[in-house]
């Protein structure tokens, strides 16, 4: 049987088919209820980000990808400690905490204001999500504490992902798992281009074990015409794209950052990967 969510870049066909998968539909049902029940708690945060995190171009693949990996870890492991690194505040950590009674879900984000939001949402939950405001480069957790860490579309926005990866390695148990997703700018007009994406994957491979073929022929694989991209998402539903307002303003911002105007919408894809910490202790 074909694995729905897999390491690497999703094809446009697989992405489209996955929208009817059990994982996606389960997340969608929970997300809708969560947003409705916590509208007042999320109001200020949503105004700074998006109103519906699941229904964003890359997140429709990223969240189910992470969910699939968490499911397998909990199934194999039983009691599990899980960390959402760079969490913001979304339905997803609360979904996992409610779904897996044998798991404890922790969230970490640099934004101090989120503590009050988590407190308000936690008051409505049967079990609590543990939130801590902290820099990912200096995590407030013990060595070998977590069975799994997931980090969704965060590392591509950081200046020094190597130090964050080192911290992930420190707090993951031997044999534990790191699940990472990140957006990739195919024309170099956004935050992380193909070359930097390859550097990120090589940095992950220095610390964690991964299938060797993942690093083969990356240049050509990023540009495969069958890949899912923002153009695929636009064709499915333009509202999946996060850019609001006149495109010229976004293109000017891209030019200031990258020196490139690029086409519109900016051609981007998403890369998802699950890695393992060796059981050989240092």
Image: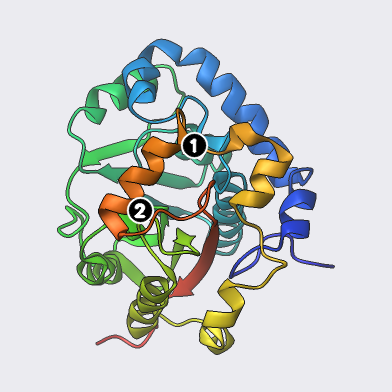
Q: Measured from the top left, where is residue 78 in percent x and y?
A: 53, 57
Q: Position of residue 229 (x, y in %)?
A: 61, 56
In this view, the residue in front, 180 or 94, is: 180
- In the rendered image, is residue 142 in sight? yes
Relative to 273, say whether 78 is above or below. above
Relative to 241, 88 lies left or right: left
Quadrant in the picture for residue 3: bottom right
Q: On screen, 242 above or below 119?
A: below
Which is in the foreground here, disc 2 or disc 1?
1
Near mark 2 (Cα within 10 A), the count class, few <14, some 14-19 or many ≥20, is: some
Q: Considering the image in quadrants, where does the C terminus appear?
A: bottom left
Residue plotted at (38% across, 31% down): 49
**Pointer 2 or 1: first along the chain:** 2
User: Residue 228: horizontal and vertical position, in percent?
Assistant: 66, 58
Q: Residue at x 50, y 51 (%)?
A: 266
The residue under the point 53% across, 63% down is 272
Q: In the depicted view, which residue is nearer to us: 74 or 228?
A: 228
Secondary structure beneath dot 1 equals loop
The residue beneath circle 1 is 242
Front-most of residues 31 and 124 = 31
Residue 116: numbered disc = none
Left or right of 155 on screen, residue 100 = right
Say if 117 sits above or below 10 in the image. above
* Quadrant of the rendering where the N terminus is positioned: bottom right
Residue farthest right in this picture: 1
Label placed on residue 154: 2
């Amino acid at each position: 049987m074909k694995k729905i969510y897999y390491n690497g870049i999703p094809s446009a066909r697989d992405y489209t088919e996955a929208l009817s998968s059990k994982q996606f539909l389960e997340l969608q049902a929970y997300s809708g209820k969560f947003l409705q029940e916590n509208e007042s708690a999320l109001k200020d945060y949503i105004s700074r980000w998006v109103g519906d995190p699941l229904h964003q171009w890359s997140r429709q693949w990223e969240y189910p990808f992470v969910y699939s990996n968490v499911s397998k870890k909990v199934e194999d492991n039983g009691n599990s400690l899980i960390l959402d690194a760079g969490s913001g505040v979304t339905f997803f950590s609360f979904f996992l905490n409610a779904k897996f009674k044998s798991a404890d879900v922790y969230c970490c984000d640099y934004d101090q204001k989120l503590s009050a939001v988590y407190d308000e949402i936690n008051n409505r939950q049967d079990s609590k999500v543990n939130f801590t405001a902290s820099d990912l480069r200096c995590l407030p957790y013990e060595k070998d504490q977590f069975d799994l860490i997931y980090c969704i579309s965060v590392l591509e926005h950081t200046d020094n992902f190597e130090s964050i990866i080192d911290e992930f390695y420190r707090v993951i148990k031997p044999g534990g798992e790191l699940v990472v997703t990140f957006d990739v700018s195919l024309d170099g007009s956004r935050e992380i281009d193909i070359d930097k994406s390859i550097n990120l994957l090589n940095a992950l491979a220095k610390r964690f074990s991964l299938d060797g073929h993942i690093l083969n022929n990356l240049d050509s694989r990023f540009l495969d015409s069958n890949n899912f991209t923002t153009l695929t998402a636009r064709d499915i539903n333009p509202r999946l794209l996060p850019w609001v307002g006149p495109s010229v303003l976004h293109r000017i911002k891209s030019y200031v950052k990258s020196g490139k105007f690029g086409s519109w919408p900016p051609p981007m894809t998403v890369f998802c990967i699950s890695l393992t910490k060796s059981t050989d202790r240092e």
